[in-house]
Image: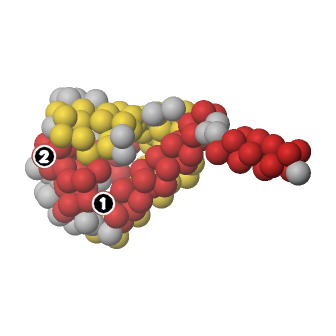
Amino acid sequence: MKKIICAVVMSTLLFACTNPSAQKEQIENDNIKFYTKVWEVAVNEGKINILDTAYASDVVLHTVPEIKGKDSAKAYYANYVTGFSNRQFIVKEMIAKGDKIVKYWQFKGTHTGNFFGIDSTGKTVDIIGCTIAKIVNGKITEEQDFVDNYAFLQQIGIIK
């Protein structure tokens, strides 16, 4: 009987212990799900208010010029929602390691509204890019996008 009780206690202890590697993998998977949902809702559904809870208050977007703070970051992305109809933001691949996420994406849309002060051209865009993001405690704290802006501006007819 002692052997059975010892076996049950040992099994309970083994399964109750948390594996740090499994915890890290779970956090990475949770970050991927969270980040995917944020951009599905913000861009594809046009519900930019999700950024109020997704971004840390001191988020930094490494763009030119650099964007700091949740309200400024939200206003930055609102340009994509108001500037383009038929928006499709497609996540082609996403990889997480620790608190970092790398997202390979495609953006399609029709330039039918004001976009960062550029009046509607009616042109369609189809660009690909990559984002490196940092997520800490369930909040996006940093993002840096890599995209061919020259090709983007050609597609909306600003540059020949």
Specify the label residue 71 is tagged with: 2
Which part of the image, by quadrant, shows the C terminus?
Answer: top left
> Is residue 106 at all visible to an observer of this figure?
no
Element under disc 1: helix
Q: What separation in Å lies between label 1 and label 2 (alpha carbons)?
A: 14 Å
Horizontally, residue 145 falls left or right of residue 71, namely right
Seen at 57% across and 40% down, the residue is: 23
Residue highlighted by disc 1: 42
Residue 85 position within the rendered picture, expressed as x and y whole percent measured from the top left: 28, 68
Horizontally, residue 106 falls left or right of residue 137, namely right
* Amino acid at the residue labelled 2: Asp
**For marks 1 and 2 on the same chain, the one whose residue lies earlier in the sequence:** 1
Tell me, yes or no, whether the two marked residues, 1 and 2, touch with CB atoms within 8 Å.
Answer: no
Seen at 23% across and 36% down, the residue is: 59
Q: Is 52 above or below relative to 68?
A: below
* Amino acid at the residue labelled 1: Ala
Q: In terms of depth relative to the viewer, which is nearer, 76 or 6?
A: 6
Residue farthest to the front? 1
Q: In terms of depth relative to the viewer, which is nearer, 60 or 9?
A: 9
